Image (cartoon, rainbow, N blue to C red):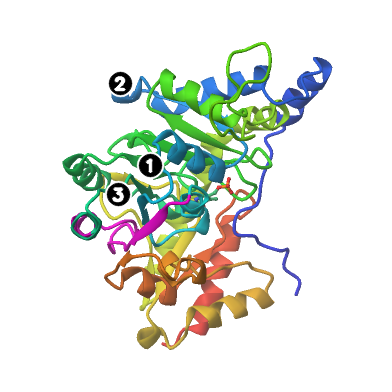
């Protein structure tokens, strides 16, 4: 096993992070809040809304995790006990867990097979059925841009508008992805970003909530800093959270912003190479942008393996690559198949279960080289029958 370990997506520093951290220490801003928090928010807002007039009122609040951002969005939308919230089934559990934190019930909706994200048709069916069964509308819709691939947002937003239900975009994996020239996380009512160690950029751990306007950002910051009312003593009229990002994490984030474009270009270049190389293997489909409207950041590169044509299962490939020190992973196991959500209503069409049984995530991060990609594809080719 002579190869270096090749990870799915490992954090990578620009070199500027340390400078922002040193400044924070020099100024003794080793606390939550502070100048880096404010500056990181300004930089994110600029990045997300640049050239998009329809997003100019958006404001960004940075918090301790992407999961916290989803939770805060639900709080701000008034989701509580007894409510239902629609959530894409094909996702990571962090998309759905905050629904349970609020004592609400997730209602899972399956995917379409072009982007692999929430099916707009099934979404409409699910809402129609929930209204018929419960007599009330779901309180929110959580749509995910999984692996960085934008969902069919025009169609999703049209269904949401028809029913008057707000949309939360889980763009935790989709920083830099675009839909019709607009950045993911700015298309819905609220947008969620993650800066966990394995995402497009990292703050060691952190996230952001993209809010529709300054008023909602203020409420987000209020709830994320213990919901303290403006009195000289500590007065509380709402249940708050300790979810604000620290000034040190924001320093890392500011350093990472200087290398964000480079990271995205690298992920896209690897994707183009994977796509070209896999085109020559019958029975393996590389997951590319399905239409010109979609511009994925290709956070992870993903493939589907036809067991009949290739004679192999994703698990065979995973185990073979593991012996070469290459990390791969099955696609996300859908939420409607998870024991924790066994009782939740689900509207299904078989797409996510099929993706889960046939898919594999391949290394795509800043440390992965074109030579690594060639080696990975040629090793996969060895396993496939001619
Ligand atoms: C990573 C991730 C989250 C959660 O983000 P954290 O910052 O790790 O809390 C939510 N949704 C999806 C789809 C993710 O991949």
- SS type, badge 1: strand
Sequence-first disc among 3 and 1: 3
* Residue 289 place in picture, x, y as percent: 33, 53
Q: Is residue 179 left or right of residue 128?
A: right
Q: Which residues are magenta?
A: 103-129
- In the image, 339 versus 343, the foreground residue is 343
The N terminus sits in image quarter: bottom right
Q: Residue at x 56, y 34 (%)?
A: 239
Q: Is residue 200 visible?
A: no
- In the image, 177 versus 1, the foreground residue is 177
Q: Which residue is mark 3?
A: 138
Sequence-first disc among 3 and 2: 2
On residue 168, the disc is: 1
Residue 368 drawn above or below residue 292: below
Is disc 2 in contact with disc 1, using a CB cutoff of under 8 Å? no
* Residue 212 place in picture, x, y as percent: 37, 27
Residue 334 sits in quarter:
bottom left
In magenta segment, residue 55 = no
Q: Crowdedness of circle 2 by 10 Å Cα count: few (<14), some, many (20+)? A: few
Q: Which residue is mark 2?
A: 53
- SS type, badge 2: helix
Q: Residue at x 27, y 41 (%)?
A: 165
Q: Residue at x 54, y 65 (%)?
A: 374
Residue 142 drawn above or below residue 374: above
């Amino acid at each position: 096993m002579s190869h270096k370990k090749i990870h799915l997506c490992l954090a990578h520093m620009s070199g500027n992070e340390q400078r922002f951290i040193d400044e924070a220490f020099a100024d003794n801003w080793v606390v939550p809040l502070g100048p880096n928090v404010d500056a990181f928010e300004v930089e994110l807002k600029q990045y997300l809304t640049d050239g998009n007039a329809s997003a100019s009122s958006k404001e960004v609040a940075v918090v301790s995790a992407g999961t916290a951002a989803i939770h805060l969005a639900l709080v701000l939308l008034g989701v509580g006990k007894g409510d239902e919230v629609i959530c894409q089934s094909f996702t990571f559990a962090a998309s759905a867990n905050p629904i349970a934190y609020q004592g609400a019930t997730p209602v899972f909706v399956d995917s379409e097979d072009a982007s692999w994200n929430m099916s707009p048709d099934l979404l409409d069916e699910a809402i129609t059925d929930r209204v018929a069964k419960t007599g009330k509308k779901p309180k929110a819709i959580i749509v995910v841009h999984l692996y960085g691939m934008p969902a069919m947002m025009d169609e999703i937003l049209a269904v949401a508008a028809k029913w008057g239900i707000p949309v939360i975009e889980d763009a935790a994996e989709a920083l830099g992805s675009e839909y019709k020239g607009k950045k993911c996380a700015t298309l819905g009512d609220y947008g969620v970003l993650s800066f966990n160690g394995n995402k497009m950029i990292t703050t060691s751990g952190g996230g952001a909530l993209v809010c529709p306007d300054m008023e909602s950002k203020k409420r987000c910051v209020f709830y994320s800093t213990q919901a303290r009312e403006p009195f000289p003593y500590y007065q509380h009229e709402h249940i708050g959270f300790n979810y604000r990002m620290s000034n040190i994490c924001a320093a890392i984030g500011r350093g990472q912003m200087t290398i964000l474009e480079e990271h995205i270009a690298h992920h896209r270049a690897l994707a183009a190479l994977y796509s070209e190389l896999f085109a020559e293997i019958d029975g393996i489909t590389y997951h590319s942008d399905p239409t010109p409207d979609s511009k994925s950041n290709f956070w992870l590169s993903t493939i589907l393996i036809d067991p009949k044509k290739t004679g192999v299962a994703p698990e065979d490939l995973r185990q073979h690559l593991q012996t070469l020190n290459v990390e791969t992973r099955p696609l996300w196991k859908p939420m409607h198949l998870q024991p924790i959500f066994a009782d939740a209503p689900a509207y299904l069409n078989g797409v996510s279960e099929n993706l889960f049984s046939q898919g594999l995530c391949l290394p795509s991060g800043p440390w992965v080289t074109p030579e690594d990609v060639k080696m990975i594809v040629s090793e996969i080719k060895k396993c496939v029958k001619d």
